[in-house]
Amino acid sequence: MNPYTSVIITLSLIMGPLLTMSSNHWIMAWTGLEISTLAIIPLIAKQHHPRAIEAATKYFLTQATASTLILFSSIMNAWTLGQWDITQMSNNTPCMILTTALAIKLGLAPFHFWLPEVLQGTTTMTALILTTWQKLAPLSLLVMTSQSLNTPLMLTLGLTSTLIGGWYGLNQTQLRKIMASSSIAHLGWMTTILTLSPKLTLLTFYTYIIMTSTTFLMIKTLETNMISVMMTSWTKLPTLNTMMMLTLMSLAGLPPLTGFTPKWLILQELTKQHMFIMAAAMALISLLSLFFYLRISYYTTITLPPNSTNYLQQWRHKTNKKLYLATMTTLSITLLPITPTLLTIP
């Protein structure tokens, strides 16, 4: 890719979500969403492969539909109230349309079908951007309008996303599709608690970004795209393989790892609100996600018996030490003891 093009795309990717997060006017927020959408499409289609072009087309169509609905809801709200302030969404119909549009942008169930296909058609690093940085702008809009959103609708979207995310990942063998289902399930947890405690939603999103980024960087370092290839990755970087297993367990939400913190706090908040059935359902549904994380961990730790295999044994080469990966792995695993400090983050 041309260096000038790369600079423009990178700056647009950074500027789009920042513009949306810092806006108080619907048109400016919508402009930020459009900038980030148009900036990521060349990165998705960069491979010049039919699957990459298909992924870029699917991403463009879904994001364009969601952007149209956001613009429609903001115009309807301005027509009713006479102002364009993001935090003033008192009319019920624009709120419902906005919730639907942002659910499409985030990939919440039942609008999740585009996310696994797009991630599978692109590179690992672009998939990392799609599942972390590109979620920032729509989620910030949800947090800004959280006081006006319909709580039963958000709880339904959250429960459905957690359920679908767990179910979808059960029979997948491609790591990027499994990470897509992980993203759907985690966004379900964020959506569930959004109207009850927006601060907890942000804390969950911060920990989700750390753990997901670490997992994608490990997948990139190990150069694996399928579960079956993970069986031979222990010969390449044994220590990183072990750390990946711990990071996956953290994504699953097992104590005493970082991923347990948001789930623990969300279940505690649901219990405080006397939503005991909802809390029990969320805890039980998370076992679906735990299953496929355990399956990947199992494949990363087993050693192949001495017989013929379809996969080549990988040589252990001397690799450059990546300090950022060590730092992110530490954060992905060891943040639970400082939970009281995390709760003070605004």
Image (cartoon, rainbow, N blue to C red):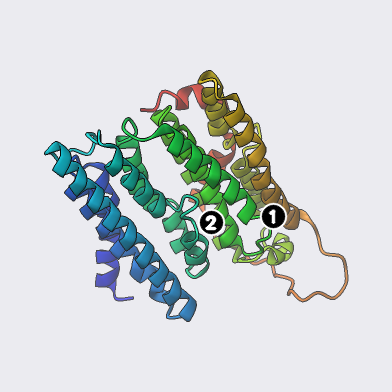
In this rendering, which labeled residue sits more in front, label 2 or label 1? 2
One can see residue 326 in this view: no
Which mark is drawn over residue 296? 1
Residue 82 position by quadrant: top left
The residue carrying mark 2 is 180
Q: Position of residue 191 (x, y in %)?
A: 45, 39
Residue at 45% from the left image edge and 34% from the top image edge: 152
Could you tell whether 110 is left or right of 305 in the image? left
Describe residue 97's horizontal placement relative to residue 216 as left or right.
left
Above or below — where is 96 with respect to 4? above
Task: Kindly identify the amino acid type of the residue bearing the numbered disc 1.
Answer: Ile
> Looking at the image, which is closer to me, 131 or 71?
71
**Is residue 104 shown above or below 328?**
below
Q: Secondary structure at mark 2?
A: helix
| Snapshot quadrant of residue 268 | top right
Q: Residue at x 82, y 64 (%)?
A: 304
